[in-house]
Amino acid sequence: MRQRIAKILARRRVWSLPYVIFMAIFIVVPLLLIMFYAFQSKEGGFSMENFERFINQPEAANTFIYSIGIALITTLICLVLGYPAAYILSKLKPSNARLLVMLFILPMWINVLVRTLATVALFDFLTLPLGEGALIFGMVYNFLPFMIYPIYNVLQKMDHSLIEAAEDLGATPRQVFTRVVFPLSMPGIISGVMMVFMPTISTFAISELLTMNNIKLFGTTIQENINNGMWHYGAALSLIMLIIIGITSLFTDSTSDEGAGDATML
């Protein structure tokens, strides 16, 4: 009996069972429920009226487009600020780089609501108005570390023999960066973009606090519909957002593969 139990425990599939159960309960089941409610009418039958309502109501569609715009702006600013920071960190001594990376990540250990309330207090202290500018500032402040760390991680593990080969062939520092370093760092850029874009487009707490609930993002619209008992319409909006995130993920994955391939060919 003991030998049989030992053989069962020795199988790798047994140890993966808790993760499968976790994914089924907290990922698969919620997704199935979202799809079930999204394609269901209030009467209980199959219907596309929730998606038709989204198309026919300009308020929800405009909020969706505005949320994508805010997410793109936030992601672009995080990339412009995060890539140079990650590049500089990758050039430092490992001990100094680890310390600075820890300082970047340290605020992430604090709850997002606390960080956002601190941002509100900062704007209040500086007598600056809350609104769209405060929203973008708060988004960048909250999600910038998610852009820096994956880029830094890729740059740190980069094969420096490729850089040395490019330099031996007479490439200038600019050419080395544009044709070797940047393409090879594309997987880190894509990971950072996804880690910033996805939570930005779906967040609602940051927009509520930094705009005094005067600016609604798509996540706020979903929350309001679910809180008001409109599960079917809220599920349809959630499914639309998931589809957009999925398409973005597929596009960024293909871009990452192409960038790495170009760098290898060079």
Image (cartoon, helix red, strand yellow):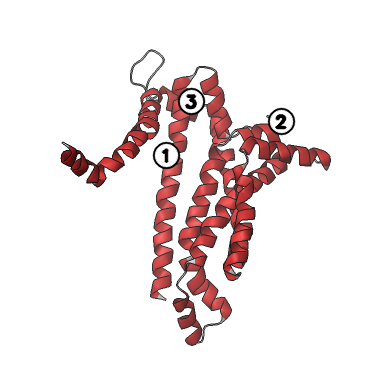
Residue 55 versus residue 254: which sits nearer the camera? Answer: 254
Looking at the rendered image, the quarter that the N terminus falls into is top left
Residue 185 location (% of width, % of height): 49, 64
Residue 243 higher or lower than 252, as above or below = above
**Residue type for callout 1:** Ile
Horizontal arrangement in the rendering, residue 128 relative to residue 107 (left or right): right
> What residue type is disc 2 on?
Met
Q: Position of residue 48 (x, y in %)?
A: 38, 25
Residue placed at 17% from the left, 41% from the top?
3
Q: How far apart are marks 1 and 2 (CA)?
A: 29 Å
Residue found 29% across the figure and 42% down from its top: 15
Residue 212 got which mark? 2
User: What residue sits right under mark 3 in the picture?
Assistant: 234
Instruction: Please indicate, yes or no, whether residue 156 appears anywhere in the rendered image.
Output: yes
State how far apart marks 2 and 3 are (Cα): 22 Å
Give the labeled residue for mark 1: 243
